Image (spheres, rainbow, N blue to C red):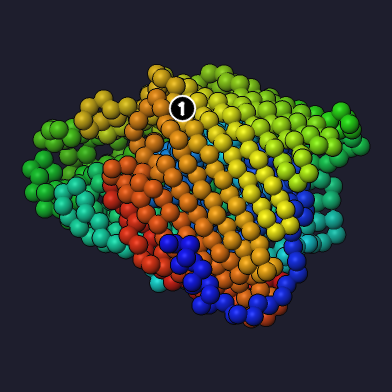
Amino acid sequence: MGLIFLLLILTLIIPVSASSQELYSYYLLSRELQVLSATKERLPLSEVPRYTRVITRDQIDRWGVRNLFDLLDRLPEFYYWRSYFGLNAVGAFGLRQSYFSEKIQVLVDGMPISDPSNGSSFSVDDIFSLSNVKQVEIIYGPMTSLYGFNASLAVINLVTYSPDEKSLNIDSSVSTGHDSYTSFMKSFKGKGFSGLISLNYSEERAPHRSYTDLLGVSAPYSSFKKSTVYYVKLKHSSGFYFKSYGVNRDDHFPLTLTYLITDGNTYADRKGFVNRLGFSRDFGNYRLDLFAKYNYFYLERGYNLCPFNHTFCSNLPPLKGVEPRAVEKRYVKNPGVGIMVSKDFGSYGKLFVGAEYDESDLYKTELRANFLPSSVNLKDLSKLVIYGKERKLPEKEGLLSPHLRATFSPYFQYLLRLNNYTLLINGRWNRTNDVGNYFSYSLSLLRKINRWNLKLNAGRAVRIPSFEEMYIKNNPILEGNPDLKGEKADSIMPSFEYKGDTFSISGMGFIYWFKDFIYKEPVSPLTYKWNNADSTVKIRGAVVSFKKLFFNNYELELSGERVFGVHGLTGEYFDFPKKKLTAGLSYMGNNMSASVFMVAYSRASSQIPGYGKIDLNLSWNFSENQKVFLSIDNLLNKKIYYESRVPGVERTLWLEWRYSY
């Protein structure tokens, strides 16, 4: 029914006489597209031995997606949702994860963007605007052997433009939900010198549907998030390069830690600065890569346990007219160095050998509060100690204490490319001072048969527990566990791909075995503690994607994922839709494009219903340098709800203008 609706809409909005455009082929495109993140070396997409998706700029524009989460929502193997705070989160392969989404890592031009204290890229940037992105590379499977801890399910690389590809890009979009995105990018070239500077500013306020909290109070669910992001990359012909990615986030949440509607006093201000200075150059058959990094992260978070906009809280005797509030601050610095040397042995393959040293230093924490955290007892609030006035609490009453994690990790990669075969072997040993030593590896094999690619990827990924999981204290809802072990994820992923001129099909099966799975174990009706699962957690499923180009102007896309089973553990990590279907129909003309896209999720749990939505996107080229987009998200205004009845996107109209050359 949804697909029929897609066809009907496109029939109404697209001219009967289609404009002609240059013929292109899926097969030729797979040979022309270059992928960097699969091996840290540029390879044609058709030569990558791992199951890989590349989303081009044309596809990003046709879909009308503005940020990374919108994009992942279009892909069947990912599950996009919002936490009750309103933070964006994503899971994959039947595993929902926490809102930190720590099993998926994001790179920008090959540089990891993650906070080492929690292992998450999405706690640094909760949007990842795609305004200045040329293509998105997604590599599936165990990748910690190449990129270090926490890349268990996938690595996503955002590839920006080079100065040869685009000189200027200005982009601005607004919505009826009072969201907006504005971006500016300028590249430059000089004598032996080139670079790019990019600035993005965004505000998000939607959705606005009603929400009812645990005490029965209802109000519009409207968070407020604003984010400023800069990115600078510089390159000199001598081989020196510099990259810097900075984020300044200001989030105000509609709910408190206790799931009560607040008047806006629950907030989080985050700053993250990721910097890398390196040298990369070829010396005959050798290549040398050196880098030094210094990253910095700051968090200020305001907690409101029982807001006075609730009669229950304002009349509670222990509070005595004072809201129990606290403000926490954390400071993390993350220096590191690395070296990689590669040697090309011709027909005998290419060997990469490297080592990295990294320090995650939570060097300062502070908690100011008007109550004593260790006195909080949700069963007996009469014991709550209220000072009445905010004060700086001693370290023993803090939520986290300073900690240093040092990691040394030598690694290797062997790549052998023959006529119809490609073999890729990766291995990495990680030695840490607080969670032990771990070895991760992966084996990838590609077999070509005409235009068919048969692939097999297997290996082990490792995720180490974050500082919050190990060391959080004085929290009545969640307790840390300093004895946590690293989480091991063994997997097997067979896949196939066929790229014809007008037809493309791909599929992947996956089986994951998690040992020492990190989860929240209930220790009382109201309190959880981080722990390692005693039993092995097993997940298995499959993904299939199909594309068909016809009349050289129309493209039909169908994709689906089916999770066949999850065994060994139950709980929120697996409240994940077992089925997902995506379908799209696009028209591509010389001066106009249009697409209708449908996403449908099955029920995730008894508390999280399934849903389907249809999005519409139109674009016009008004001149050689100007383009206008008109998009409607959730065209039929279907009601979408996540865990704890957090509402999803409403029907929203977007208008976007872009100028580039």
Residue 116 screen position, x and y as percent: 52, 36
Against 147, residue 644 (above or below) is below
Placement of the N terminus among the 4 image quadrants: bottom left
Residue extending farthest right: 284
Q: Is residue 604 left or right of residue 581?
A: left
Q: Nearer the viewer, residue 87 or 359?
A: 87
Image: 591 above or below 60:
below
Q: Is residue 659 left or right of residue 47?
A: left
Quadrant containing the C terminus in the rendered view: bottom right
Identify the amino acid type marked 1: Lys
Front one among 338 and 495? 495
Q: Is residue 434 left or right of residue 525?
A: right
Q: Residues within 10 Å of mark 1 (few under 14, many from 20)?
A: some
- 359 over 13 or under it: above or below: above
For the point 54% across and 61% down, which residue is it?
584
| Residue 397 visible at all | no
Identify the element where label 1 is drawn. strand
- Residue 509, given in percent of the width and then of the height, sits at 56, 36
* Figure disc tally: 1
Q: Residue at position x 30%, y 35% from top?
A: 393
Q: Quadrant of residue 344?
A: top right
Residue toward you, 180 or 97: 97
Q: Which residue is mark 1?
A: 538
Q: Residue at x 32, y 63 (%)?
A: 208
Q: Residue at x 77, y 40 (%)?
A: 449
Judge from the rendering whether residue 429 lies leftward or rightward of residue 219; answer left or right. right
Percent coordinates x, y for residue 13 in the rendering: 53, 77
Position in image of residue 391 (x %, y %) = 27, 41
Q: Is residue 560 visible?
A: yes
